[in-house]
Image: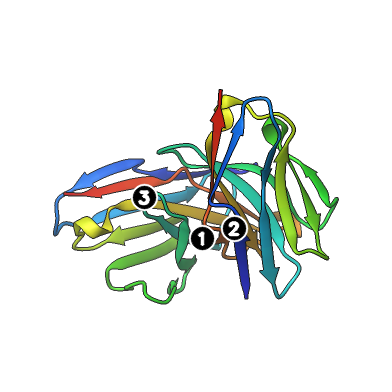
Amino acid sequence: AQSVTQLDSHVSVSEGTPVLLRCNYSSSYSPSLFWYVQHPNKGLQLLLKYTSAATLVKGINGFEAEFKKSETSFHLTKPSAHMSDAAEYFCVVSVNAGKSTFGDGTTLTVKP
Amino acid sequence: GAVVSQHPSRVICKSGTSVKIECRSLDFQATTMFWYRQFPKQSLMLMATSNEGSKATYEQGVEKDKFLINHASLTLSTLTVTSAHPEDSSFYICSARDTRGGFYEQYFGPGTRLTVT
């Protein structure tokens, strides 16, 4: 069994300030973890993924995430938010590229 | 990364009609594909797992007679929404599992927005 909890449904930051989107997971097996971004009325875009290699994962657009097994967390961070980062973010867990379980999503708002 | 396409990207149909959505893996073979549904302002929920050459496995609460899945080839899975109703209006996203070289990767399609009037 696997599950994902995104701890914040909404996060609001000012442009140029850091972003932190929190995700906790549960999995009976060694999981792969992903962060996807979805802009309004668009499909999913993969930001980054963890697949049992380095625990600090760097993704696109300056995002990164750290896999912490002891805390069962995979939080997404970015040092400096940009207006274009405003979107819905999903934390996802799967095992061996099997069925994916999505978190409920976090809406990121970036204020000018 | 590999590419997964969906067709159509948008479709509007009348209540009571059927709609077919295609999911294709363009540069790899996928014995397994997944279908997800996303209602407005909600997360994605797995509907079914599509296995090439065999019957799909549906998640609890998903009507298999309403959402027909056919995975007739290693690069194509189709989802047919039969007798569509307005409550079926949703964003349908497929993904395909790439197992080349012993590594497992999953790639999502761009989605199909279905509106039933």
**Of callouts 3 and 2, which one flags the residue occurring earlier in the amino acid sequence?**
3
Which quadrant: the N terminus of chain B? Answer: top right
Q: What's the residue at 44%, 38% (across, down)?
A: A42
**Are dots 3 and 2 in contact, CB under 8 Å?**
no
Distance of label 2 from label 1 (alpha carbons): 6 Å
Residue B75 appears in the figure: no
Residue type at mark 2: give it: Arg
Q: Which residue is mark 3?
A: B40
On the image, which quarter does residue B60 sit in?
bottom left
Q: What's the residue at 27%, 68% (across, down)?
A: B66
Distance of label 3 from label 1 (alpha carbons): 23 Å
- Indicate the secondary structure of the residue bearing disc 3: loop
Residue type at mark 1: give it: Met
Q: Residues within 10 Å of mark 3 (few under 14, many from 20)?
A: few
Q: Residues within 10 Å of mark 2 (few under 14, many from 20)?
A: many
- Indicate the secondary structure of the residue bearing disc 1: strand
In the rendered image of this protein, does residue A109 appear above or below residue A50? above
- In the rendered structure, find residue B33 and report the number of the disc placed on it: 1
Residue nearer the viewer, A60 or A12: A12
Q: Which residue is mark 2?
A: B97
Circle 3 chain: B
- In x, y percent, where is residue B102? 75, 60
Distance of label 3 from label 2 (alpha carbons): 26 Å
Q: Residues within 10 Å of mark 1 (few under 14, many from 20)?
A: many
Residue A36 appears in the figure: yes
